[in-house]
């Protein structure tokens, strides 16, 4: 119980910034003696520090704040396009960042050596006494034995035991979670989902991810594949998906599939980037607007099943496809409204994510830092 309460104090300081003991007591519904006891323990461990006095009316009260630089973790994002590594402190601030591109032709050994290069560069920049470990946001499905089973775009790594790879190399605590769950963790701590304990995050990017957060924790499922909304069928007998099924959401609404359909429909445009498509949409290009509107319709259909069944309070939009602006968002909302049980749609708040797409690396670091909050406090 004491550990849980200490964690709650740290979370409150992350969310609220400098706070008095009195405010902590009222926010956490804990009596003054308990708060004094918890604060004393956290001050002793240097996880928090004093920060002057409140200037509001009444008796000045000493403020407490998180000692953000007391601990650090390395967060890594491994996706088909690049590897991003970040050194992140307890406050979610990125102290150092390194990245490298991955090419379609890279072999397994090349990708792994790039990963080692990023880790080693970051390790040289951190203080060993502060570093608690490494977290990884991966793209695909990792089974319960930590073996990468499926990863479109990174199939060269399939079959690798990712945990063994990192633990053998660095002898540091290691944690891993898929990209969309890491993004949800980052949004929960530092972005749009601060203070929201139950929400659905949809990530529309080159692939499609979805995370269900319940009581502040992402749902993983019995085979660690919860949230695979990208592989729910929205077009029966549609195009073959990389997963082997036909008509999955990813075949009609991922950035990769939209780029492919542009190449088919408008070969004169050549290979288009998502920035280029967004520009066409903003200029009212009929074909571009139709393609994005249709993608939004299918995203709405897929999400409607989830929203009708789970009745979550919040839905968070993340990912590069949202650079298409209101055309996409309006199409999703309109489709969602038409296909969702009225009471579920009516009680749903739809909000934009606040963090950059590669913030999954921050969420990966939080996998380690969250343990600190639980174990050291
Ligand atoms: Zn599929």
Image (cartoon, rainbow, N blue to C red):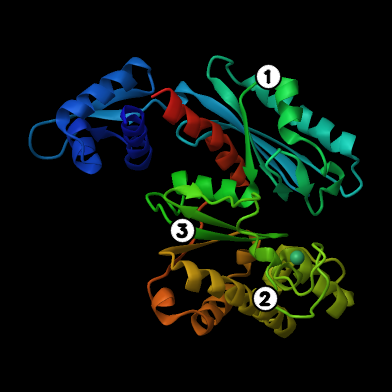
Lower position in the chain sequence, tag 3 or tag 1: 1
**Residue 350 visible at all:** yes
| Category of crowding for the residue at label 2, using alpha-carbon neighbours closer than 10 angstroms: few (below 14), some (14–19), many (at least 20) | many
Choose top left, top right, bottom left or bottom right for residue 306.
bottom right
**Label drawn at residue 236:** none
Along the line of sight, the residue nearer the viewer: 124 or 219: 219
Along the line of sight, the residue nearer the viewer: 170 or 23: 170
- What is the spatial separation of the Cα atoms under label 1 and label 2, in whole angstroms? 44 Å
Image spot of residue 85 (x, y percent)? 67, 35
Q: SS for tag 2?
A: helix
Lower position in the chain sequence, tag 1 or tag 2: 1
The quarter of the rendered structure image containing the N terminus is top left
Disc 2 Cβ-to-ligand 1 distance below 8 Å:
no
Instruction: Describe residue 287's horizontal placement relative to residue 197 as left or right.
Output: right
Position above or below: 64 against 294: above
Instruction: Describe residue 280's horizontal placement relative to residue 189 as left or right.
Output: right
Please state the quadrant of the image where ligand 1 appears.
bottom right
Q: Which residue is mark 1?
A: 171
The quarter of the rendered structure image containing the C terminus is top left
| Category of crowding for the residue at label 3, using alpha-carbon neighbours closer than 10 angstroms: few (below 14), some (14–19), many (at least 20) | many
Image spot of residue 164 (x, y percent)? 74, 28
Q: SS for tag 1?
A: loop
Along the line of sight, the residue nearer the viewer: 227 or 87: 227
Lower position in the chain sequence, tag 2 or tag 3: 3
Image spot of residue 252 (x, y percent)? 73, 73
Instruction: Describe residue 279's horizontal placement relative to residue 303 as left or right.
Output: right
* Residue found 56% across the figure and 21% down from its top: 131
* Residue found 76% across the figure and 43% down from its top: 148
Q: Which residue is mark 2?
A: 295
**Residue 139 visible at all:** no
Q: Which residue is mark 3?
A: 199
């Amino acid at each position: 119980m004491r550990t849980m309460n200490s964690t709650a104090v740290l979370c409150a300081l992350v969310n609220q910034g400098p706070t008095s003991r009195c405010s902590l007591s009222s926010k956490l519904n804990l009596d003054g003696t308990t708060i004094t006891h918890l604060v004393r323990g956290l001050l002793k461990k240097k996880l928090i520090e004093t920060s002057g006095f409140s200037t509001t009316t009444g008796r000045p009260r000493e403020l407490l704040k998180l000692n953000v630089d007391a601990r650090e973790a390395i967060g890594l994002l491994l996706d088909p396009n690049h590897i991003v590594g970040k050194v992140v402190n307890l406050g979610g601030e990125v102290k150092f960042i390194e990245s490298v591109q991955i090419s379609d032709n890279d072999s397994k050994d090349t990708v792994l050596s790039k990963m080692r290069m990023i880790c080693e560069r970051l390790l040289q920049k951190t203080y060993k006494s502060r570093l608690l470990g490494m977290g990884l946001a991966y793209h695909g499905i990792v089974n319960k034995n930590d073996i990468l089973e499926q990863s479109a775009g990174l199939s060269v790594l399939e079959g690798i035991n990712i945990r063994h790879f990192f633990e053998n190399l660095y002898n540091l605590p290691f944690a891993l979670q898929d990209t969309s769950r890491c993004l949800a963790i980052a949004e929960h701590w530092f972005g749009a989902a601060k203070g929201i304990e139950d929400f659905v995050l949809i990530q529309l990017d080159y692939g499609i991810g979805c995370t269900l957060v319940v009581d502040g924790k992402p749902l993983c499922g019995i085979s660690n594949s919860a949230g695979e909304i990208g592989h729910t069928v929205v077009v029966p007998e549609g195009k073959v998906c990389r997963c082997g099924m036909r008509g999955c959401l990813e075949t009609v609404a991922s950035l990769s599939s939209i780029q492919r359909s542009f190449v088919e429909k408008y070969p004169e445009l050549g290979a288009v980037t998502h920035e280029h498509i967004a520009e066409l949409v903003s200029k009212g290009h009929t074909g571009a607007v139709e393609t994005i509107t249709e993608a939004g319709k299918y995203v709405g259909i897929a999400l409607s099943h989830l929203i009708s069944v789970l009745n979550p309070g919040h839905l968070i939009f993340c990912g590069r496809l949202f650079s298409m602006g209101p055309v996409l968002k309006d199409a999703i909302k309109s489709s969602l409204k038409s296909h969702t049980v009225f009471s579920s749609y009516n009680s749903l708040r739809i909000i934009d994510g606040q963090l950059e797409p590669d913030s999954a690396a921050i969420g990966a670091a939080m996998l380690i830092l969250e343990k600190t909050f639980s174990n050291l406090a």
